[in-house]
Image: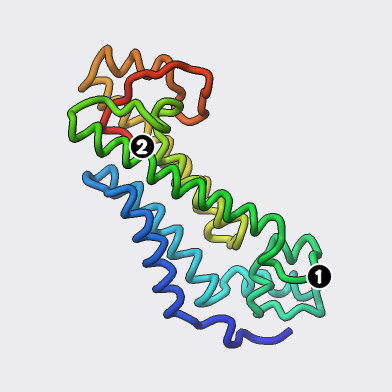
């Protein structure tokens, strides 16, 4: 088993990729209050943890090196391809970047960022008009931006799973659920019957594509 070489220790790439994916999400999410910053900060921490292992130091590979070395004796565990653990563990051959899970990860990333973009566009214009956001993705779910963040993180897990991000993912999903419920309490207090009418016909997270338009409070994400 070779030791870590030039495939890691690329901290410049850690910084550049973190800035790109955090900045891209920020351009669509635009946090304005403490609750927004908490949700955005959690996503940012996930991204930094991911790229720190992808290009900086392969902590997961290091911790599992004994078991992986005995199971895959001919594999350079500290080469970049071995970091695609789903590919390695299922015994696939060839370039992992063309594997089904890797390609599927791009679909989740694209869907997540698209959802963030469309949700922010609707929310922004609704806020400017002092109206309920009820167009676009808000027709089907009450918290499309949180769903977008979860889709992005899940896409990254399909592409490059690590022990840290695997632990972080369910914790962050639970945090987003709690933030969503907290937002809804505030929205109900502020909007009363309009919010309750909207919430009655619009699911929190699982889309209902057969429903009619409802109303959407401008303060939720």
Where is residue 146? Give x, y as percent: 41, 41
Q: Nearer the viewer, residue 69 or 21?
A: 21
In the displayed structure, does residue 162 sit left or right of residue 132? right
Q: Judge the density around disc 1: few (<14), some (14-19), many (≥20) Cα neighbours within 10 Å.
A: few
Q: Nearer the viewer, residue 103 or 65?
A: 103
Q: Nearer the viewer, residue 69 or 214?
A: 214
| Residue 2 higher or lower than 23, as above or below | below
Residue with the mark numbered 2: 179
Residue at 45% over, 26% down: 140
Residue at 80% over, 73% down: 72
Circle 2 SS class? helix
Q: Judge the density around disc 2: few (<14), some (14-19), many (≥20) Cα neighbours within 10 Å.
A: some
Q: Answer with mark 2 or mark 1, whichever residue precedes in sequence.
A: 1
CA gap, disc 2 and disc 1: 42 Å
The quadrant in which residue 12 appears is: bottom left
Figure colour scheme? rainbow
Residue with the mark numbered 1: 71
């Amino acid at each position: 088993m070779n030791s870590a070489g030039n495939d890691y220790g690329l901290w410049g790439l850690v910084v550049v990729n973190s800035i790109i994916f955090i900045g891209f999400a920020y351009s669509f999410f635009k946090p304005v209050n403490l609750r927004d910053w908490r949700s955005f900060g959690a996503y940012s921490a996930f991204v930094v943890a991911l790229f720190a292992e992808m290009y900086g130091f392969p902590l997961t590979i290091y911790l599992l090196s004994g078991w992986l070395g005995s199971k895959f004796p001919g594999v350079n565990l500290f080469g970049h391809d071995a970091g695609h653990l789903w590919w390695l563990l299922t015994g696939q051959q060839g370039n992992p970047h063309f594997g089904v899970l890797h390609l599927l990860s791009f679909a989740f990333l694209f869907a997540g960022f698209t959802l963030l973009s469309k949700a922010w566009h609707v929310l922004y214009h609704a806020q400017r008009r002092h109206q309920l956001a009820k167009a676009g993705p808000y027709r089907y779910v009450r918290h499309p931006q949180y769903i977008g963040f979860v889709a992005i993180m899940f896409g990254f897990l399909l592409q490059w799973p690590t022990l840290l991000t695997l632990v972080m993912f369910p914790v962050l999903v639970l945090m987003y659920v709690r933030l969503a419920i907290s937002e809804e309490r505030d929205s109900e207090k502020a909007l009363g019957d309009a919010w309750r009418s909207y919430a009655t016909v619009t699911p929190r997270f699982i889309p209902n594509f057969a429903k009619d338009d409802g109303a959407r409070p401008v303060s939720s994400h």
